[in-house]
Image: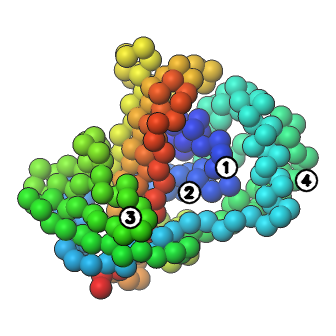
Amino acid sequence: MIFLYRCLRLSALLATLIFSTNVFGQKQSSVDSNALALQFVDRLLPEGNYTAAVLGTPRPNASQGAIVQKMKLAIKDNEDWFLQVMNELKPGEPMPYHKNLGISEEEYAAFMQFSQSIKIDKVGAIALKVIRRDSSLHFEPTDFGDYLKYLVIDLKDHRVMVDRLGLPYKGQITMDAKRTTLVAGPWKGYSWRLEEFRKEGQLIADPNKVDPTEMREMDIKSVEVIVGKLDHSDQCFLYLKSDIVNKGHVLAKQDLAFLLTKE
């Protein structure tokens, strides 16, 4: 789990942390080049009309929701402690129970049980056009997901951009049947991610060494794109995440996940 996810997803303990942990533990950046990844995208997304299944997680039931709400309030009251604990965890290591979470050990066990069983499934559908313009892919959604209009995949110059921000290539992702969080099944794909931390205008080389209590003083840009293909169909999994924070104030926050089917 990357540092930014530990620090910025306080309100999404039930879903986003689990999703990011499972996905990013599978990267193999030494195997696949950016050029090969974009060739994969080129084959996967021909120009035309698509049906885009909007993906999300199920809402917790009443008892689960009550646990999550108590945790949110307790974490808000103990935010510095929470950030410090999360920063000290090893990748994939679950957070141990502590009374500062605001719930009992039994409630925490129940939280861990239902949170680890969450799957991402279809919660709606929209129409989407993929357009090729100047050797680049552009996305035109209807009714939902307007942020996709800021995504441009330049097939000629091998660049993935969101709102004109270039995203460095990060590697291949393989989500097999045991690890996939998609109800639709296992998939393989590639990711591009920009993470930039600045304090008083100065770039922080290693965000993992930042004292969590200093996060409110920092300017943060975290933008990610994942493009994958389901193992058992030609459907495309498309994920776009954006967190832009200025000294603790969230300027932009997006989490969009789709399964695209060519019409």
User: Residue at the spot x=46%, y=59% of the render?
Assistant: 256
> Of the residues shown, which amino acid type is indicated by label 3?
Leu
**Mark 3 or mark 2: which comes first in sequence?**
2
- Of tags 3 and 2, the one toward the viewer is 3
**Mark 3 or mark 1: which comes first in sequence?**
1
Query: Looking at the image, do the residues carrying marks 3 and 2 touch, with CB atoms under 8 Å apart?
Result: no
To which residue does mark 2 refer? 19
User: Residue at the spot x=55%, y=27% of the render?
Assistant: 248
Q: Which mark is residue 106?
A: 4
> Of the residues shown, which amino acid type is indicated by label 2?
Phe
Residue 219 quadrant: top left
**How far apart are the two marked residues, 4 and 2, measured between alpha carbons?**
24 Å
**Mark 4 or mark 3: which comes first in sequence?**
4
Please say whether residue 165 is visible from this viewpoint.
yes
Under circle 3, the secondary element is strand
**How far apart are the two marked residues, 4 and 1, measured between alpha carbons?**
17 Å
Q: Position of residue 243 (x, y in %)?
A: 46, 41
Under circle 2, the secondary element is helix
User: Residue at the spot x=54%, y=42% of the render?
Assistant: 5
To which residue does mark 3 refer? 238
- Of tags 4 and 3, the one toward the viewer is 3
Quarter containing the N terminus: top right
User: How busy is the neighbourhood of tag 2: few (under 14 within 10 Å), some, or many (20 plus)?
Assistant: some
